[in-house]
Amino acid sequence: MAVALSLRVSVVATLLSLPFAIYIAYLLARRDFWGKQLLNALVHLPLILPPVVTGYLLLLTFGTQGAIGAALAEIGIVFAFRWTGAVLAAAVMAFPLMVRAIRLGIEAVDPRLEEAATTLGASPVSVFSTVTLPLILPAVLAGSVLAFAKAMGEFGATITFVASIPGETQTLPSAIYAFLQVPGGESSAVRLVVIAVIVAMGAVLASEVLARRMSGKVSGL
């Protein structure tokens, strides 16, 4: 149950974060604007703050008593102590890794290629979709894999924001923690640990392969 929930949370968090990550990465890599460094700092803040602090901030903001959470609750959207809240927490914690990977991919693309397409009359959207995006696709995939792995392993922010409710918010890390708190639960915890290690190793290896492909593709242009 916890494994299936973690997979669902991680996949949804990754897919929902991806469009925003691409947009933010493009802004940071290609645009100069007032507040750019502040935006960059905000994006990477979850990597610096203790996860419990991030979870508490999410609870204050998106809890049923929070400014945003209360308004959303009135229209039937609730995050606190729901699996959707686990998605939000996982997305927030994984977002910086995704943005960083995609930003590095964009910065590796020669801007002259985009400029050439622009001089031929292509719109900015067309330039991005036909020139930039195909070249950064390996970076997008690598960032998505890293974000998925981070979401699978997220614990501190998730348990603070949505607790550990079996069948509702108990993800893989919180299930491992719960098994370790009861006598005789070590064997069950070990099985989940093995699954977590396999997923993490698979994500790292996939990320390395995709990063190598990205480097080779860009350098070959």
Image (spheres, grey):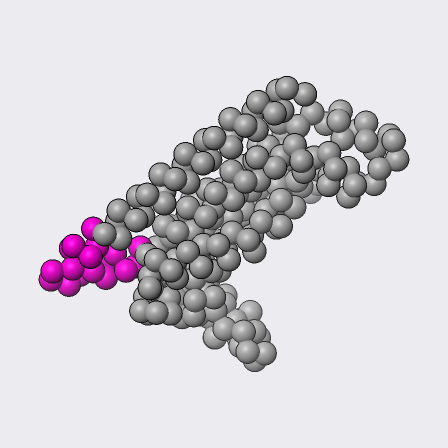
Expressed as whole percent of the image width and height from the top left, the position of residue 95 reads 51, 48
**At 62% from the left edge and 20% from the top edge, which residue is drawn?**
219
Residues shaded magenta:
173-190
Q: Residue at x 26, y 49 (%)?
A: 193
Q: Nearer the viewer, residue 57 or 110?
A: 110
Is residue 81 rendered to the left or right of residue 98? left
Which of the 4 quarters of the picture holds residue 141? top right
> In the rendered picture of this protein, how many numbered marks are placed on residues?
0
Q: Residue at x 33, y 64 (%)?
A: 1
Q: Quadrant of the C terminus?
A: top right
Position of residue 101 relative to residue 183, above or below, is above
Between residues 1 and 29, which one lies in front from this camera angle?
1
Residue farthest to the bottom, as pictured: 74
77 is higher (above) or lower (below) than 109: below
Q: Residue 192 in the image: x percent, y percent?
A: 26, 53
Q: Is residue 54 visible?
A: no
- The picture places residue 78, in percent across and down from the top left corner, at 50, 73
Q: Quadrant of residue 90?
A: bottom left
Asked whether the viewer can see residue 173, the reply is yes
As for residue 39 lying within the magenta part, the answer is: no
Q: Main secondary structure of the magenta part?
A: helix
Asked whether 174 falls inside the magenta stretch, the response is yes
130 horizontally vs 171: left or right: right
Residue at figure coordinates x 43%, y 66% from the top left: 83
Considering every residue shown, the one lying at the far left of the view is 183
| Residue 166 position by quadrant | bottom left
From the top left corner, tell me how far across and down residue 143 is, in percent: 52, 40
Please determine whether, in this image, residue 127 is positioned above or below residue 158. above
Q: Does 145 sit left or right of 28 as displayed?
A: left
